[in-house]
């Protein structure tokens, strides 16, 4: 089986149209959380006497996370539109689309979607925490149902840990010396759904010629999904996270930004070549 490798190339002026344009909208703010990592080798390579080195990239789709809610806005924007929206912000960091299949320093695997937040069992079964014991007419304890509910209510939601890693919030939770109150405040960020994008940049020449997967940098950025939609979230995520792409962050950056779309001039997404599934399947799911 062959997989098409897509990249942004050429120069095409465009104006992005919001698919939700007909809905009533007003300007709102959102706080974007960003976690970023880069290898020391890449950081050194990126710095030059004249500033940030120019580097070009290809893109490849990773995993789309639909979450557990029915969110139609996730279907209203494609990966192509996501990258077209991020491209102007990335260009300010001297990251631009590669012009040909052979060119480029990086292939960026893109994961996107919304976190999956399960219902809190303690909220679904509040009677499990009341501490009462039931008895039958003969005075025998009948605690079967309550004991089962109590077990369910005390289960930790398995999505918390995976969502923390997916969004990069785990980096803040793993900091040494974190006060219990601060840890709880950070964990609370995971209690509701978050829109997110994850960029993972691999060494493209090494992958193309030697089939080796070397991660150069990664950037995970997210914002609360409540009271907004993924279409409006994407440009806000890009504006807040772009300055940290290809850098190292100690913990999380918290940037307040406006929700909404913009205009720009970026490359056109097109298929330029084919790469075997075997060459890319290992990094697609990372």
Image: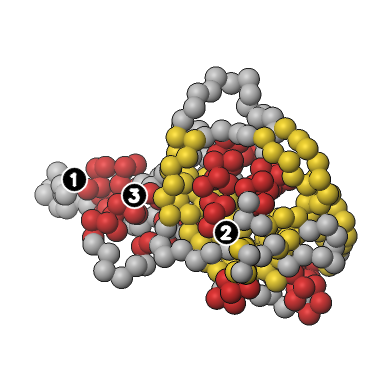
Viewport quadrant of the N terminus: bottom right
User: Which mark is on residue 280?
Assistant: none
Characterize the local packing of mark 1: few (<14), some (14-19) or many (20 or more) Cα atoms within 10 angstroms.
Answer: few
Characterize the local packing of mark 3: few (<14), some (14-19) or many (20 or more) Cα atoms within 10 angstroms.
Answer: few
Residue designated by label 2: 245
Are dots 3 and 1 in contact, CB under 8 Å?
no
Nearer to us of marks 2 and 3 is: 2
Residue designated by label 3: 188
Residue 245 horizontal/vertical position (percent): 57, 59
Residue 110 horizontal/vertical position (percent): 65, 56
Residue 30 horizontal/vertical position (percent): 45, 39
Is 85 located above or below residue 103 in the figure? above
Residue in front for this viewpoint, 32 or 103: 103
Residue extending furthest right?
273
Viewport quadrant of the C terminus: bottom right
The disc, 3 or 1, on the residue closer to the chain's N-terminal end is: 1
Q: CA–CA distance between discs 1 and 2?
A: 49 Å
Is 85 located above or below residue 276 in the figure? above
At 65% from the left edge and 30% from the top edge, which residue is drawn?
A: 18
Is 71 located above or below residue 93 in the figure? above
Residue 210 in view (yes/no): yes
The disc, 1 or 2, on the residue closer to the chain's N-terminal end is: 1
Residue in front for this viewpoint, 168 or 87: 87
At 81% from the left edge and 41% from the top edge, which residue is drawn?
A: 12
Q: CA–CA distance between discs 2 and 3?
A: 26 Å
Residue designated by label 1: 130
Q: CA–CA distance between discs 3 and 1?
A: 24 Å
The disc, 2 or 3, on the residue closer to the chain's N-terminal end is: 3
Residue in front for this viewpoint, 94 or 27: 94
């Amino acid at each position: 089986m062959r997989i098409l490798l897509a990249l942004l190339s050429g120069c095409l002026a465009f104006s992005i149209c919001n698919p939700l344009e007909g809905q009533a909208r007003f300007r709102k703010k959102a706080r974007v959380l960003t976690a970023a990592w880069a290898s020391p080798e890449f950081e050194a390579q990126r710095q030059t006497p004249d500033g940030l080195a120019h580097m070009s990239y290809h893109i490849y789709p990773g995993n789309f996370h639909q979450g557990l809610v029915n969110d139609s806005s996730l279907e209203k924007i494609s990966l192509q539109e996501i990258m077209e929206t991020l491209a102007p912000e990335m260009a300010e960091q001297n990251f631009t689309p590669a012009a040909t299949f052979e060119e480029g320093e990086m292939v960026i695997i893109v994961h996107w979607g919304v976190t999956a937040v399960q219902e809190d069992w303690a909220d679904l079964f509040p009677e499990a925490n009341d501490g009462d014991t039931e008895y039958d007419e003969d005075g025998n304890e009948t605690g079967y149902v309550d004991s089962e509910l109590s077990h369910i209510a005390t289960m930790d939601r398995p999505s918390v840990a995976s969502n923390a890693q997916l969004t990069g919030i785990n980096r803040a939770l793993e900091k040494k010396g974190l006060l219990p109150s601060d840890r709880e405040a950070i964990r609370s960020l995971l209690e509701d759904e978050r829109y997110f994008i994850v960029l993972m940049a691999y060494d493209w020449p090494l992958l193309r010629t030697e089939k080796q997967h070397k991660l150069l940098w990664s950037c995970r950025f997210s914002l609360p999904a409540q009271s907004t939609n993924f279409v409006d979230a994407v440009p806000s995520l890009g504006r807040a996270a772009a300055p940290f792409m290809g850098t190292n962050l100690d913990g999380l950056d918290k940037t307040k930004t406006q929700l909404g779309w913009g205009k720009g001039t970026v490359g056109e997404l097109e298929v330029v070549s084919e790469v075997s599934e075997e060459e890319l399947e290992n990094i697609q799911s990372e």
